[in-house]
Image: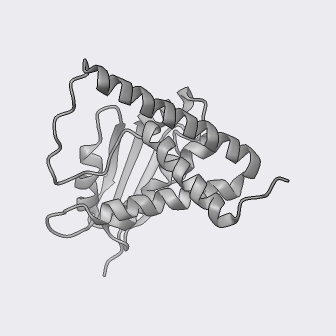
Amino acid sequence: METQPSRRDFCRLAAGAAVLASAGVASAEAPSAVPQPAPPKPDDARVARLEAQLKAQQDGSLRLLQELYAKHGEPLLATIAAFTAADWKARMEKVQIAGERNLQALKSALWDKLPPSFEWQLVEQTEHVLQFKVTACPLAAENKKRGCPPELGYALNCASDLGIAAGINPRIRFSRTKTLMQDGCCCDHRYEMPET
């Protein structure tokens, strides 16, 4: 007799799979004030085996998420997106920032540290508004390469942006009308911080 998992078990399974799957899709980590050790030499056979094992786990997790999404639809996406946003909010709350946690701090902690594979332009910058146009995103490119549905890629990756803003400062309001992940011509990130 087949039993249905409880909603709690389902959410745990989806969140765990999301962590593994997004680890392979996401290439940008939360900035860290702690110096990171040099990466191991790529010719080390043991490291190569571990990397292959991790990639296999990530691919398996992504396939699992795709199957779960096909079966459970929107509720799964909502669970993953909420998990992604909360996870990144917690990460950004821990980032050491000199001075105020304002829009300039968000730009310095996130945008100024993105790898060159992200292509973006600063559209507007004032004390209360920060807007960017992203024209190339390695996360969206990898998502498409791996055949992940755009809405699942959004929940695994793009949902982080709301959490990142809130983690820098809960008063920052984040909005966006389109994403490369969902086949838009660009991502239009807008951050607003109202006067106190």
User: Is the C terminus in the top left, top right, bottom left or bottom right quadrant?
Assistant: bottom left
Q: Is residue 3 above or below residue 53?
A: below
Residue 15 position in % (x across, y down): 54, 55
Left or right side of 91 for 180? right
Residue under the image location 37 percent in, 74 percent down: 171
Left or right side of 8 for 145? left
- Judging from the image, the colouring scheme is one colour
Residue 156 position in % (x across, y down): 52, 48
Residue under the image location 79 percent in, 57 percent down: 3
Instruction: Decide if residue 67 is in sight here.
Output: yes
Q: Is residue 178 above or below residue 51?
A: below
Q: How many marks?
A: 0
Q: Quadrant of residue 135?
A: top left
Q: Nearer the viewer, residue 176 or 106?
A: 106
Instruction: Decide if residue 191 is in sight here.
Output: no
Q: Is residue 61 above or below residue 92?
A: above
Residue under the image location 62 percent in, 36 percent down: 63
Q: Nearer the viewer, residue 50 or 32?
A: 50
Residue 33 position in % (x across, y down): 17, 54
**Residue occupying the far bottom of the picture:** 196
Left or right side of 112 for 81? right
Residue under the image location 24 percent in, 46 percent down: 112
Q: Quadrant of residue 136?
A: top left
Q: Nearer the viewer, residue 178 or 2?
A: 2
**Residue occupying the far front of the picture:** 1
Q: Quadrant of residue 146?
A: top right
**Residue occupying the far right of the picture:** 1
Residue 113 position in % (x across, y down): 25, 45
